[in-house]
Amino acid sequence: MVDFEAIREEFPILNQRIHGHPLVYLDSAATSQKPQCVIDAESEFYRTINAGVHRGAHELAARSTTAFEEARAKVARLVGANYEEGREEVVVTAGATAGLNLLATAFGNASLGRGGEAAKRFALGPGDEIVVSEAEHHSVLLPFQELAARTGATFKWIGLTEDGRVRTDNLDEVITERTKVVAVTHVGNTTGAITDIAPIIRRTHEVGGVFVLDACQSVPHLKVDFHALDVDFAAWSAHKMYGPTGVGFLYGRRELLEALPPASFGGSMVELAWMDKPAQYMEPPARFEAGTQPVAQVVAAGVAAEWLMNIGMENLEAHERTIAAELLKLGDIDGIRILGPNENENRIGTVAFDVKGVHPHDVGQFIDAQGIAIRVGHHCAQPVHRHFGLFASNRASSGIYNSVDDAKALIEAASRVRAFFKAE
Ligand code: PMP
C-alpha cells in the first residue's frame, strides 16, 4: 500500500497557505510540483559534478556524462524504451514542444532530400497527407500544420465525439494510402480523455505511415510502454512528470531515429566537419542533441522517473482515479458542464468545465480566493474549445499529491460560484 499522504509531504511548495487557506494545487496538467528529491538532485549536481558532457578528459566531465546517460536510461525505463549504449531511443529536448518541432523540422528536411535514401520514408510532398486530431494541443497542431504548408502536403484531422473523445469510427476514410504522418495526443489536455490509440496506430502502419504520440498528459499519470503501444515517436515534458522545467524527451523507435535527419545543427552532434565537404553526423541520440545540454535538469528528471517507478505507475493511476471520480461531481452542480467524458472510464483526473454565465477568469479568481489553483483559458487547445462551442474554460487537474479532500474543496467552492456572480 502506497502512503500518498506521506508522498504529499515530499512536496515543500504545498506546505503553505494561499489567501489564508491551505494551498490546494489542481493545475498539474500545466505543470506539476517537484518532490524534494528532484529539487535536491539539481542542486547536488551543481554542488558536486557540474561539467559539460561527452567532452573533456577530466574526472568531472566523466562523472557528468555518466549521470546524464544514467538519467536517460531511467527515463527510458519509465516508458519502455531501449537505453543500452548504441541502441538508445530517448533523445533529450527542451520540452515536448521542442521535441515535436524537432520531428516536424526533420520531416521537412527529409522532404528536401536531406538524410539520403533512409530518410525518404519521412519525405512529404503535394498529394501526401498529414493527419492530426481535433483534440490536439497547439504544440502538435501548429508544427504539423506548418510542415504541411512547407511541403505542400494536405493537412487533415480526425474529429471528436460529442463528449470530446478522438473518433475511431472513420479512420479508414481519414487515414489513407497517401497518409505519411499521423500525430495524436495520448490524453487530451482539456478533456482528460485517454485516446483509443491502438486502432489509429494500426491503421497508420497499415498505410505505411509514421505515428507520433503526444505523451505529455499520459506519461505523468499512466503506465506507458512505447514498445507495447507500437508508437514510432513520442514527445513529452519533464516538468509535468515531477521533473524540472526546460527539459523534455523524444522517444523514437531505434531504426527510425537512425533514419531521421537532424533538425538542429552545432556542437556535439557531428563526427567530422570540414570547410569544403558536408559534415558527417553522429548516430542517435547525439545527432539530435546539438549544443550544450541541460545536464542538471536531465539528471533531476532521471530522479523523477526513478521516483515514479518506485511508487509504481499502477498505484498512481489507481490513486488518481479516486480523485477523478470526485472531480467529475463538478458535472452535478447546477449550471456546470464538463468538457469531456463524464464517466470515469478511459480518462484521467483532468476535468475542464464551463460555468454557465460566469467568465472563466472570474471563476478562476473566485476559486483562487479559496486557496485552490486551477487553470482558466483555452489551455492551448482552441479547436477543442470550439468543438464545445466555447473559447475558454476552467480546468482542474490532479497530480500525485492530491487527495479526494482537495477535489471536495473545489466542488464546494465551485458550487458557490454562480450564486456569487448572480449568474442567470
Ligand atoms: N501537449 C500537451 C497535451 C500538453 O498538455 C502540453 C503542455 N501544456 C504540451 C503538448 C506542450 O508541452 P510544453 O509546453 O512543456 O512543451
Image: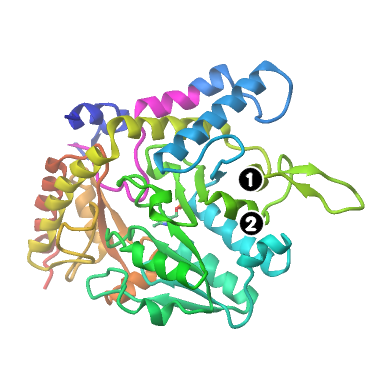
The amino acid at mark 1 is Pro
- In the image, 38: left or right of 18? right
Instruction: Describe the colour scheme in one phrase.
Output: rainbow
Q: Which percent across, then down, holds residue 36?
A: 36, 26
Q: Residue at x 43, y 56 (%)?
A: 230
Q: Nearer the viewer, residue 356 or 110?
A: 110
Q: Which percent across, then down, holds residue 399?
A: 27, 43
Does residue 396 sit above or below 311 in this rendering?
below
Q: Quadrant of residue 238?
A: top left
Q: Quadrant of residue 92?
A: top right
- In the image, 304: left or right of 45? left
Is residue 136 visible in the rendered structure shown here?
no
Q: Mark on residue 126?
A: none
In which of the image's four quarters is ligand 1 placed? bottom left
The amino acid at mark 2 is Leu
| Quadrant containing the N terminus in the rendered view | top left
Q: Is mark 2 within 8 Å of ligand 1?
A: no
Is residue 133 visible in the rendered structure shown here?
yes
Residues tagged 1 and 2 counted as in contact (Cβ below 8 A): yes
Q: Mark on residue 284?
A: 1
Residue annotated with mark 2 = 260
Estimate the spatial distance between the alpha carbons at disc 1 and disc 2, rounded to whole Å: 9 Å
Mark with earlier residue (1, 2) = 2
Q: Residue at x 43, y 37 (%)?
A: 77
Q: Which percent across, then down, holds residue 93?
A: 55, 46
Residue range highlighted in magenta? 21-43
